[in-house]
Amino acid sequence: MTEKVYDSKVIRKQILFLIIPVMLENVFQMSAGLISAAMIGRLEPSLISAQGVSSRITGVLWGLFKGIGIGATVVMAQSKGEGDFSKCKRVFEQTVVTGC
């Protein structure tokens, strides 16, 4: 097997291509919270506080599922690198069941 040699410029470019979608997802998530707060801001104070609480709960759940997804991605990448495709299948199935 031949081993590829990457210089730091190529690695930075690849990392940037991985980071951009994650950054956009975070920006859109925060924007949705700000937009809903702005729309609710014209209503009663109790509704504003309810939106704040629900936003926190949503954030916690979002972080939990994001962590599960990242962990599954790491394990699947390691399994694929080892050539253990049955483990990849098991990890995928467990992740889907956990996410549902």
Image: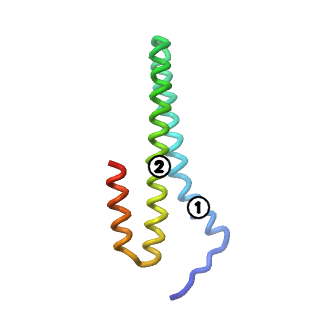
55 vs 49: above or below = below
68 vs 54: above or below = below
Q: Position of residue 39 (x, y in %)?
A: 46, 20
Write down the quadrant of residue 86 in the picture.
bottom left
57 vs 75: above or below = above
Write down the quadrant of residue 87 in the picture.
bottom left
82 horizontally vs 92: left or right: right
What is the distance, in whole Å, between disc 1 and disc 2 at their CAs? 19 Å
Q: What residue type is labelled 2?
A: Lys
Mark 1 Cα shell of 10 Å, populated few (<14), some (14-19), many (≥20): few
Checking the image for residue 1, the label placed there is: none
Foreground: disc 1 or disc 2: 2
The residue lying at 49 percent from left, 19 percent from top is 49
Q: Position of residue 30 (x, y in %)?
A: 52, 36
The residue lying at 44 percent from left, 47 percent from top is 65
Checking the image for residue 15, the label placed there is: 1
Q: Tag 2's secondary structure?
A: helix
The residue lying at 53 percent from left, 58 percent from top is 18
Mark 2 Cα shell of 10 Å, populated few (<14), some (14-19), many (≥20): few
Q: Where is residue 63 in the image (x, y as percent from the top left)?
A: 49, 44
Sequence-wise first label, 1 or 2: 1
Q: What residue type is labelled 1?
A: Ile
The residue lying at 45 percent from left, 61 percent from top is 73
Q: Which color scheme does this rendered protein use?
A: rainbow
Q: Which one is nearer the viewer's eye here, 91 or 32?
A: 91
* Contact check, label 1 and label 2, Cβ < 8 Å: no
Q: Name the residue under label 2.
A: 66
Write down the quadrant of residue 7 in the picture.
bottom right
